[in-house]
Image (tube, grey):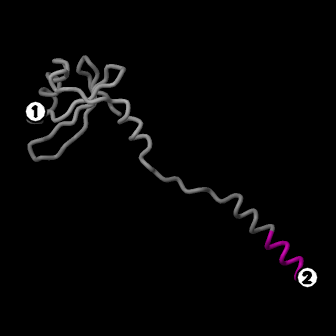
């Protein structure tokens, strides 16, 4: 009888371990991949269409840093009047991109 109870417990324990789902966690790998695609450029290299769109859509912000990738997309780090910083993405024509 002891062997039967032990064997049943062993089988049920094995099934529980094999069906347990591993936890999903966010480790930031995708953010690093996105960041690696962009290379920093001078603010003067940002197209006029983007600076005009920035002034129109976000009045009062200051362009702090600019990045560009191979697809002619730009990542802009802007600072608002209250000191907070935000990242914006745009294409070369000044159209905003959601990433």
Q: Is residue 65 magenta?
A: no
Check disc 1 and report its element: helix, strand or loop: loop
Residue 46 in picture, x, y percent from top left: 19, 22
Residue 63 vertical placement versus 17 (above, below): above
Residue 73 in picture, x, y percent from top left: 31, 23
Check disc 2 and report its element: helix, strand or loop: loop
Give the position of the N terminus as an image quadrant. Answer: bottom right
Classed neighbour count for the residue bearing mark 1: other residues with Cα under 10 Å, few (<14), some (14–19), many (≥20): few
Give the position of the C terminus as an image quadrant. Answer: top left
Which residue is nearer to you in this view: 12 or 39?
39
Residue 6 vertical placement versus 16 (above, below): below
Residue 36 in picture, x, y percent from top left: 37, 34
Residue at the extreme right: 1
Q: Which mark identifies residue 1?
A: 2
Q: Residue at x 89, y 78 (%)?
A: 3
User: Looking at the rendering, which quadrant does residue 67 occupy?
Assistant: top left
**Residues under labels 2 and 1: Cα distance?**
80 Å
Residue with the mark numbered 1: 59
Question: Pointers 2 and 1 in contact (CB under 8 A)?
Answer: no
Residue 52 in picture, x, y percent from top left: 14, 22
Residue at the extreme bottom: 2
Q: Residue at x 76, y 64 (%)?
A: 14
- The segment highlighted magenta reads 1-10
Residue 8 vertical placement versus 18 (above, below): below
Q: Residue at x 25, y 37 (%)?
A: 87
């Amino acid at each position: 009888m002891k062997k039967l109870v032990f064997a049943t417990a062993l089988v049920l324990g094995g099934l529980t371990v094999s069906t347990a789902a591993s936890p999903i966690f966010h480790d930031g790998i995708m953010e690093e991949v996105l960041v690696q695609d962009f290379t920093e450029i001078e603010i003067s290299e940002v197209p006029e269409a983007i600076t005009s769109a920035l002034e129109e859509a976000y009045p009062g912000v200051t362009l702090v840093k600019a990045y560009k990738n191979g697809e002619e997309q730009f990542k802009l780090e802007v600072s608002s009047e209250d000191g907070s910083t935000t990242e914006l993405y745009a294409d070369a024509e000044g159209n905003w991109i959601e990433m």
